[in-house]
Every structure is written in C-alpha cells, then in structure tokens.
Image (spheres, rainbow, N blue to C red):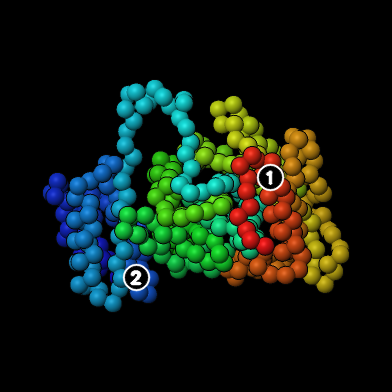
Amino acid sequence: MDEQILEILSRIAHPESDKNIVELGMVEALTVSPNRISFSLRFGRPRDPFAGDLRRQCEQALGQRFPDYAVEVALLFAEAKPTTSAAKKTAAHTPVAPENVRFAVAVMSGKGGVGKSTIAANLAVALAQKGYRVGLIDADIYGPSIPKMFGAEDAKPLLNEKEQIIPVEKYGVKVLSIGFFVKPGDPLIWRAPMATSALKQLLMQAEWGELDFLLVDMPPGTGDIHLTLLQELKLTGVVVVSTPQQVALADALKGINMLSNANVKTRILGLVENMAWFTPAELPQNRYYIFGKGGARQLAHARQLPLLGEIPIVQSICDSGDDGAPAALSDGLPRAAFETLTENLLAQLGKTEDFFVNVEN
C-alpha cells in the first residue's frame, strides 16, 4: 500500500519546481494503520506559501483513492537562519519554556540501558496520580520507548486548527514521542540537525495546555540533542539516572559535569539509583545487590547532590513496561519506590521560590 500512496503523491508537483513532492524528498514518516494514513511534508525554508495548498491536494488525492482511511498530513519547515545581529547574540541566547508550563524537568542518563525511560514514565504517572497536570515528551529520538510503556504504540496525534500537535493522553499524562510518527521497528537514520529540529517541533509546536510538570525523557549520553534541549528549553532542573555499576556511574558523572559546566549551568535536582538491588516476589524482604551496593548514593554524597530514590529490580516493573501500564499504577513495592522518588523530587522543588501545589486534598 505504501507504493500505491507514493505513486499517487508523485502526481503532485510543487508549483515552484518541475519535480513532484516525492522526487523532492518532501514526503517523510509515511505510516499506514488500520484506518489512517499519515505522513509529513518537509519544506526547505521556514515558511512556504504553497504549503497549505499542497497539503489539501495530498488529502484530497488520497481521500478519493482510499475513502475508508483518514488522511493526516503534518507540515515541517526548516529553521530560519539567524540574522547577523542575532548571530552575534548567540552567547546571550535565552532558553524559553513552552507556554503555560510551570516546571520543566529533564530525566537523563550518561549511558543507555539504565532504565531512564522507565523512571521518566513512572514519575509522570506518579505525579499525575497526585493530581498534578503532567506532560511527558519522549526526546529519545533514536530509541523512543515511551509509546510502548504507555500502551500507545498505535496512537497518532492530530493537529488542531493552529497546526499544533495534540498530545496523546493516557493515565492522566499528556504524551508526545517521535515514535508516534514512524513505523514501529523502523530505524531513524537522521543526522543530528534533523533530529534536533524534530525535537524542537515536539517541544514548541504542541498543544500542551496548562501543565504543572513537563517531563522530558532525554536520550542517553551528552550529545547534540542534549545541548539543543538545554539551550532551547528553560528547564527547572534535571534528574540523573544511573545503576550502581561503576561503568554506569562513570558515565553519569560525565552528565553531571556537563550540566555543571559554566556554559550550560543547569540545576541538578538529584540522582536516582535504578536496579539498586534484586528482590524476588516470594521473598519481598530480601535484597541481592547484583550490580553493586550504593554506588549512586556514594556519587551523590561526593558531589553534594540529593539521592532522590533507589528503585529495586522487581519483575513487575519490567512486565508493566512491556504491557503498557507503568508500575506506579499498581500496588506493592514498585509503587512505594516510585512514590518515594516523587515525594523527594517535590521536596527539592519545594526549595524553588515559585514552587506551588495545585491540588485539592
């Protein structure tokens, strides 16, 4: 069916070119689900006067050929080049926050595989259960896992009349991920500028509404996407996730050093030690320190940072992520661990002058 769609789209030419939109490489992220066809049209300049007309042509042509499918076309534009005067002011660039977002908190790790996305997903759900208005953006561009953790792999965000992306809402959390716009299993072979551009669109061109918290699940490492986020988004602070393993702690320290750098200078709200110990379901009082004991606690102490939580290895945490229902929704040890993490994070934010609680008990 993809070939049929592309064949139809190849009949639509850009008015300023003798080539069609497929030849021009404008069609991206084509996805076909049971009742929906969605893709993006990418334009090579900040605004294109023919964008709206081209989208209507695409919708009409595909709607006639596939009347049983809803057709959704997102418009992606290149960033405007800074003027000479603006370029001179780069060093004084001021990050901005999405409108009506009170606290923007990033969750990051120095390396992959430490459970950063699991922490971000469960923290978002735990905050929502306390009555906060929460958004979660999956900024792990190359390995988006939040859609699966929320059981929303087939979700396709819509656009409002202002051409803003409407986040998917589940478990009281508004969620956006690049994973909603690509086929599951397809690799994202993007250069850094394309990835950072997509991230900024998810951040700034979405209809978040009024939020108490916007959590950002960062990709692992300390690369271009991290710098873009830290430069463009006004963050309240960052939560750093690690396991007790020395290799993971060494990479977490790199992340801490990056955040502490004079050119970045972002507040670190604290560390979370994930996979702190193994507790079998049949012996809930037993602890087996598979990856070492207290590594993140020692690092937090050495850098004079708060230890926000210690999350054990429990089978139900893994299962809940695979099943699309974060463990913070359930009862027992996992929920208690994430509640402790949430309370400690709120306590750190309580040290911020403009902290508030918008919950009626």
Give the number of callouts. 2
- Quarter holding the N terminus is bottom left
Tell me, yes or no, if residue 318 can be seen here: no
- Where does label 1 land, which residue? 350
In terms of image quadrants, where is residue 264? top right
Secondary structure state at the residue bearing disc 2: strand
* Kind of residue at disc 2: Arg
Q: Is residue 105 left or right of residue 346?
A: left
Give the distance between the C-alpha atoms of the residues marked 2 and 1, in whole angstroms. 45 Å
- Dot 2, how many residues are within 10 Å of its Cα: few (below 14), some (14-19), or many (20+)? some
Q: Is residue 359 left or right of residue 183?
A: right
- Whether the residues at callouts 2 and 1 have beta carbons within 8 Å, the answer is no
Give residue 174's position: percent from left, percent from top. Answer: 51, 60
In terms of image quadrants, where is residue 127? bottom right
Q: Which mark is residue 36?
A: 2
Tell me, yes or no, if residue 293 can be seen here: yes
Residue at 49 percent of width and 54 percent of height? 210
Residue at 25 percent of width and 75 percent of height? 67
Using the image as rendered, state which of residue 315 and residue 57 is in the foreground: 57
Using the image as rendered, state which of residue 241 and residue 347 is in the foreground: 347
Residue at 63 percent of width and 31 percent of height? 260
Q: Is residue 239 left or right of residue 160?
A: right
Residue at 66 percent of width and 45 percent of height? 349
Pointer 2 or 1: first along the chain: 2
* Kind of residue at disc 1: Gly
Give residue 11's position: percent from left, percent from top. Answer: 16, 60
Compared with 346, 6 (above or below) is below
In terms of image quadrants, where is residue 82? top left
Give residue 33's position: percent from left, percent from top. Answer: 38, 71
Secondary structure state at the residue bearing disc 1: loop
Give residue 319's position: percent from left, percent from top. Answer: 65, 68
Compared with 222, 150 (above or below) is below
